C-alpha cells in the first residue's frame, strides 16, 4: 500500500505520514525543513541554508551540521531508509538539496495550483483556507526573515488582496471577511490590509465596525509609529462615511485627502465667506481638483458656481485685468467700477467662485466674494501668501500624484499597455505630464510651455540659479550649497530659493531645505544646455566640489586610511539623520567627480568619505571609496597619492580578510615610496606588512617588520609616529610572548603620548598593555588597561575599536570565571558589530553561546 504524506508550511511546519505526525526534533532541523518546504520542489543551496540558520558567517563545521540534519529529515520522511541512502523525497541538487513535493503532498503547491490562471472566488477562498497562520510560524523569527519565506508571504498577501477585491465586486464580502480579519490581526500596522477589511465590513452591513476599525488603526499608527493614516486607509474611510461609491471622473483620480480638506472648509449658509488657496507647481492638477470640488458641491451654492481663468501663467497672453475678470465672471461689458459692480451683484447671494490660474494674491483679492455662505477657490503657481496672511485663506498645496494614482490616471487616459509604467516613471506623478505623455519623450511641449511661464516670471538672478541647479546631482539643497554654486552669500541664495519656491519651481519641504520635481529638473537642464557656457558649467562644478571638501574638512575630518598617521585629536560628531545625509551626498559627489573626469577632486572627496567611514569599520564602503580614490589619483597622474591610497586599500582588504589583495597593494606601493625616499610612508608599509604576517600565522616575521618600522621612525619621524611604532612593536612582541620587552615599548609610547597630550592615540597602547597582561596572567592589570582604552574609544567615537576592546574584556572575564561581566561585554560588542553591519557579530554570538554567556 502506498504511503501517504502531507506537509504544511503555510502556518506551523507539520508533517503526517500515513496519518501519524512526523517529529522533526531540534529547532534548527525544523528551520531547515521549513526552508526546503518553502522553496517547494526547487533547490535550496548550501549558502542559503547556512545564511538562514546562522544569520551571518557560519561556523567552520556548518556543512557537517547541515548534512546531519539532512540525514535525520530523510529518516523522518522514510523511517525504514538505510543510513546514508538518499531515498525518494529529499534529493541532492546542484549546490544543495531539493524536496520532491507535489500539490498532493505540500500545502504551498496546492495553494498555487488553486490560485493559478483565472481562479474563481471559490478557488481563491479554498487556497487561502490552507494558510492557517504566518509562513513557518513555529520557526524562529530570525530565520523567517529570510527572503525564501518573505517571498511566500508576499504571494499569499497578493492572493488575499485579489480575493478581497473580487468579493467586493461580486457582493460576497462575508465569504472572505474572516480570512482578511485574521490576517489583519496578525499584521496590526498593515494599512492596505486594514483598508480592505474596512471596505469588507462596510459591504457586509457593518458600517459602525468599519468606522471603529479606522479609529483603532489610526490610534495605533500614531502611538507606535508616530504617523497618520496613509491614502489607502483614508480613501476607505471616506467611502464608508459616504455610504456610496465614490464619484469618479475619467481623468480625475486620487487627491482624496486634499479634496476632503477642501470640501470641509466650504461654509454653510450662515457661516462667514471662506477662501481656499490651492497652490502647486505647473501641471500638478490644481484646476482639476478645484473643478471636481465645484461639481460635488454645486447644490450647496444655489446662486451658482462662477469660474474664470485669470491667465496668470498662460503662455502668450498677459494676466486678466480686474475689468476683464469681472466681465468674464458676470458677462457684462467694460464696467466703469469693476470692484463695485462685482460686490453689488454678489451681495446677499450664495456663490462659489473658482479663480483659476491667478498670477498672485493681488490679482485675486478684488474678486473674493464677501457674503456669508460664499466661497472662493483660488488656484495658482504662486504661494498666495498674501491671501493666507491678510484674507485668512486656507492653504492647500498639491504635490505629484503617488504611483498608484498616477498609474490609474494613465490607464484612464490611454488604456492598459506596456507603456503605462514607463509613462508613470518618466512623468513623476505630474498629471499634466501623464495625460499628454509620449513614452519616448519625458518632457512634452505642453509641460515645457507650462513651466516656461513660471520661468519667465523670475528675476535674472533667480533664473541664473535655476540653470545652475540642473548641474547639482541631488534633489535636495539648502542656502549654503546654493550659495557655493553661484558665488553668493547664504542670505542672498536664500532669497533666490524663496523666489523659485514662490513660483512653485522648488518646494521648501522643511525649513531651509528645498527640492524639485524631476520634470522641473529636466526643464532646467534644457535651459542650462543653451544658456550656460561650458566655462561657467566647469566653474559651477568646481565650486560644488570645493563646498563639500571645505565643509566636511572643517566639521568632520576624523581619520585617514594611512596606516602610520595618527588621526587628529577631534571627537567624531555623533551619527544623526543630517550626518547620514551628508555622507550620502559626499558619495554622490565622489561618483560625479569620477564620471565627469575631475580626477583632482576624486581622491580628495574619497578621503573625506573615508574620514566618515573609518571609525565605523564599514569596510565595503571604504573599499568603494578607496577604489574610486585610486582611479581618480591615477587619472590625475598623482603617483604618490595613488601609492598612499594603495596603503589604505591594503588595510581595507585586510579588514575584509582578503589578504592576497592587501599584499598586492602593499607591494605596488612600496617602490614609489623607495623612489621618493618617503621614510614615513615606508614605516607605514612595514606596519601593514607586520599586521598581515601576523594574520597569516607568522608573528615572528611580523615582529621583524615592526622593528624595522621603529628604526625608520626613530631616524627623524615625528614623536607621535615613534609612539605608534613602539606600540606596534610591543604588540608583536606580546604575540611572541616577549612580555617584558612589550611592556617596556608600550610604556615608552605612553610617555611620549602623554607629553604630546595625544589622548586618542593612547587608546591603542592601553589596549596593547591589556593584551600583554592578559597573556601573562595578570587579569586585574589587564582589565584596568582595557577599560582605559575603552573610555578613550568611546570619547572619540571609535565604534569598531570599542567593540574589539569589549571582546577582549570578555575574554579576560571568562578566564576569571566572571560570566556576568563577560556576557555584558560581549552583548555590547555584538550590538555594536550588528549596528556596523559586521559579519563578525555572528561569530561573537557563537563565542558567547559556547561559554554559556
Image: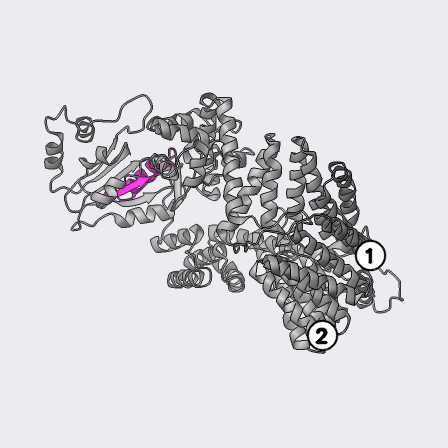
Question: What span is in magenta?
Answer: 276-299
Q: Position of residue 375 (x, y in %)?
A: 21, 43
169 vs 376, nearest the viewer: 376
Indicate whether residue 266 is drawn in magenta. Answer: no
Q: Position of residue 530 (x, y in %)?
A: 46, 21
Secondary structure under tag 2 reads helix
Q: Is residue 675 above or below residue 830?
A: above
Secondary structure under tag 1 reads strand
Q: Where, by quadrant of the figure, is residue 291 drawn?
A: top left
Q: Can the viewer see residue 618 in this picture?
A: yes
List the residue tagged with mark 2.
779
List the residue tagged with mark 1.
91
Q: Can the viewer see residue 804 in this picture?
A: no
Q: Is residue 610 left or right of residue 325?
A: right
Indicate whether residue 290 is drawn in magenta. Answer: yes
Q: Is residue 478 above or below residue 725?
A: above
Task: Tell us which disc is closer to us: 2 or 1.
Answer: 2
818 vs 639, nearest the viewer: 639
Q: Is residue 835 above or below residue 480?
A: below
Q: Is residue 86 left or right of residue 379?
A: right
Q: Residues within 10 Å of mark 1 (few under 14, many from 20)?
A: some
Q: Where, by quadrant of the figure, is residue 204 drawn?
A: bottom left
Q: Residues within 10 Å of mark 2 (few under 14, many from 20)?
A: many
Question: Quadrant where the C terminus lies?
Answer: bottom right
Distance between the alpha carbons at the discs numbered 2 and 1: 53 Å
Q: Position of residue 365 (x, y in %)?
A: 20, 37
Residue furthest to the bottom in view is 817
Question: Quadrant where the N terminus lies?
Answer: bottom right
Residue beneath the point at 74% across and 45% down: 682
Q: Earlier in the sequence, mark 2 or mark 1?
A: 1
378 vs 102, nearest the viewer: 378
Q: Where, by quadrant of the figure, is residue 354 drawn?
A: top left
Amino acid at each position: 500500500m502506498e504511503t501517504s504524506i502531507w506537509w504544511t508550511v503555510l502556518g506551523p511546519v507539520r508533517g503526517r505520514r500515513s496519518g501519524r505526525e512526523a517529529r522533526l526534533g531540534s529547532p534548527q532541523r525544523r528551520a531547515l525543513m521549513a526552508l526546503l518546504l518553502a522553496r517547494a520542489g526547487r533547490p535550496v543551496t548550501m549558502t542559503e541554508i547556512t545564511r538562514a540558520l546562522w544569520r551571518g558567517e557560519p561556523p567552520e563545521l556548518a556543512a557537517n551540521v547541515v548534512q546531519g540534519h539532512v540525514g535525520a529529515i530523510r529518516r523522518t520522511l522514510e523511517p525504514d531508509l538505510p543510513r546514508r541512502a538518499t531515498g525518494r523525497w529529499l534529493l541532492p541538487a546542484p549546490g544543495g538539496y531539493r524536496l520532491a513535493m507535489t500539490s498532493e503532498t505540500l500545502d504551498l503547491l496546492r495553494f498555487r495550483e488553486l490560485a493559478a490562471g483565472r481562479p474563481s472566488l471559490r478557488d481563491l477562498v479554498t487556497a487561502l483556507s490552507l494558510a492557517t497562520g504566518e509562513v513557518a510560524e513555529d520557526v524562529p523569527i530570525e530565520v523567517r526573515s529570510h527572503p525564501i519565506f518573505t517571498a511566500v508571504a508576499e504571494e499569499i498577501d497578493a492572493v488575499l488582496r485579489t480575493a478581497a477585491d473580487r468579493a467586493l465586486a461580486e457582493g460576497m464580502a462575508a465569504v472572505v471577511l474572516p480570512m482578511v480579519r485574521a490576517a489583519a490581526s496578525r499584521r496590526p500596522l498593515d494599512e492596505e490590509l486594514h483598508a480592505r477589511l474596512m471596505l469588507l465590513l462596510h459591504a457586509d452591513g457593518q458600517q459602525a465596525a468599519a468606522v471603529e476599525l479606522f479609529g483603532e488603526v489610526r490610534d495605533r499608527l500614531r502611538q507606535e509609529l508616530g504617523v497618520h493614516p496613509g491614502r489607502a486607509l483614508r480613501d476607505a474611510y471616506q467611502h464608508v462615511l459616504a455610504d456610496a461609491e465614490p464619484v469618479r471622473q475619467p481623468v480625475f483620480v486620487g487627491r482624496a485627502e486634499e479634496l476632503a480638506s477642501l470640501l470641509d472648509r466650504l461654509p454653510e449658509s450662515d457661516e462667514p465667506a471662506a477662501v481656499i488657496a490651492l497652490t502647486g507647481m505647473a501641471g500638478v492638477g490644481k484646476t482639476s481638483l478645484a473643478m471636481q470640488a465645484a461639481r460635488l458641491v454645486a447644490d450647496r451654492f444655489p446662486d451658482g458656481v462662477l469660474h474664470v481663468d485669470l491667465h496668470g501663467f498662460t503662455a502668450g497672453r498677459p494676466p486678466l485685468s480686474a475689468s476683464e475678470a469681472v466681465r468674464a465672471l458676470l458677462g457684462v461689458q467694460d464696467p466703469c467700477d469693476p470692484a463695485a459692480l462685482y460686490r453689488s451683484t454678489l451681495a446677499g447671494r450664495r456663490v462659489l467662485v473658482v479663480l483659476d490660474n491667478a498670477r498672485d494674491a493681488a490679482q485675486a483679492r478684488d474678486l473674493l466674494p464677501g457674503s456669508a455662505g460664499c466661497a472662493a477657490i483660488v488656484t495658482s503657481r504662486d504661494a498666495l501668501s498674501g491671501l493666507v496672511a491678510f484674507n485668512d485663506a486656507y492653504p492647500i498645496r498639491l504635490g505629484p500624484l503617488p504611483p498608484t494614482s498616477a498609474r490609474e490616471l494613465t490607464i484612464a487616459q490611454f488604456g492598459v499597455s506596456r507603456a503605462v509604467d514607463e509613462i508613470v516613471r518618466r512623468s513623476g506623478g505630474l498629471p499634466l505630464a501623464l495625460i499628454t505623455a509620449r513614452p519616448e519623450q519625458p518632457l512634452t511641449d505642453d509641460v515645457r510651455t507650462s513651466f516656461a511661464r513660471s520661468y519667465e516670471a523670475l528675476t535674472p538672478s533667480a533664473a541664473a540659479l535655476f540653470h545652475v541647479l540642473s548641474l547639482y546631482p541631488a534633489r535636495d539643497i539648502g542656502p549654503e550649497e546654493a550659495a557655493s554654486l553661484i558665488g553668493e552669500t547664504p542670505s542672498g541664495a536664500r532669497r533666490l530659493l524663496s523666489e523659485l519656491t514662490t513660483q512653485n519651481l522648488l518646494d521648501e519641504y522643511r525649513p531651509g531645505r528645498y527640492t524639485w520635481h524631476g520634470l522641473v529638473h529636466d526643464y532646467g537642464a534644457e535651459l542650462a544646455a543653451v544658456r550656460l557656457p561650458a566655462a561657467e558649467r566647469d566653474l559651477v562644478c568646481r565650486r560644488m566640489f570645493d563646498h563639500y571638501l571645505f565643509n566636511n574638512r572643517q566639521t568632520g575630518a576624523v581619520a585617514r586610511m594611512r596606516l602610520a598617521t595618527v588621526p587628529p585629536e577631534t571627537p567624531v560628531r555623533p551619527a544623526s539623520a543630517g550626518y547620514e545625509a551628508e555622507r550620502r551626498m559626499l558619495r554622490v559627489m565622489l561618483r560625479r567627480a569620477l564620471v565627469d573626469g575631475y580626477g583632482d577632486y576624486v581622491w580628495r572627496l574619497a578621503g573625506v568619505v573615508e574620514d566618515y567611514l573609518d571609525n565605523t569599520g564599514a569596510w565595503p564602503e571604504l573599499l568603494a571609496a578607496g577604489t574610486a580614490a585610486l582611479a581618480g589619483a591615477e587619472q590625475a597622474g598623482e603617483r604618490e597619492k595613488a601609492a598612499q591610497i594603495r596603503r589604505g586599500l591594503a588595510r581595507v582588504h585586510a579588514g575584509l580578510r582578503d589578504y592576497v589583495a592587501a599584499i598586492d597593494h602593499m607591494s605596488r606601493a612600496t617602490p614609489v615610496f623607495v623612489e621618493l625616499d618617503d621614510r614615513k610612508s615606508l614605516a607605514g608599509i612595514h606596519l601593514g606588512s607586520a599586521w598581515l604576517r601576523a594574520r597569516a600565522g607568522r608573528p615572528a616575521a611580523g615582529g621583524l617588520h615592526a622593528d624595522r618600522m621603529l628604526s625608520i621612525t626613530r631616524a627623524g619621524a615625528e614623536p607621535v609616529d615613534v609612539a605608534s611604532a613602539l606600540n606596534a612593536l610591543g604588540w608583536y612582541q606580546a604575540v611572541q610572548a616577549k612580555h617584558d620587552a612589550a611592556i617596556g615599548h608600550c610604556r615608552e609610547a605612553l610617555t611620549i603620548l602623554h607629553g604630546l597630550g595625544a589622548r586618542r592615540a593612547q587608546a591603542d597602547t592601553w589596549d596593547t598593555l591589556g593584551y600583554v597582561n592578559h597573556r601573562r596572567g595578570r587579569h586585574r592589570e589587564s582589565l584596568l588597561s582595557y577599560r582605559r582604552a575603552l573610555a578613550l574609544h568611546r570619547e572619540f567615537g571609535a565604534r569598531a575599536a570599542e567593540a574589539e576592546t569589549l571582546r577582549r574584556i570578555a575574554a579576560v572575564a571568562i578566564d576569571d570565571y566572571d560570566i556576568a561581566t563577560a556576557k555584558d561585554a560581549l552583548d555590547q560588542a555584538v550590538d555594536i558589530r550588528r549596528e556596523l553591519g559586521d559579519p563578525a557579530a555572528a561569530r561573537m554570538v557563537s563565542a558567547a553561546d559556547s561559554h554559556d554567556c
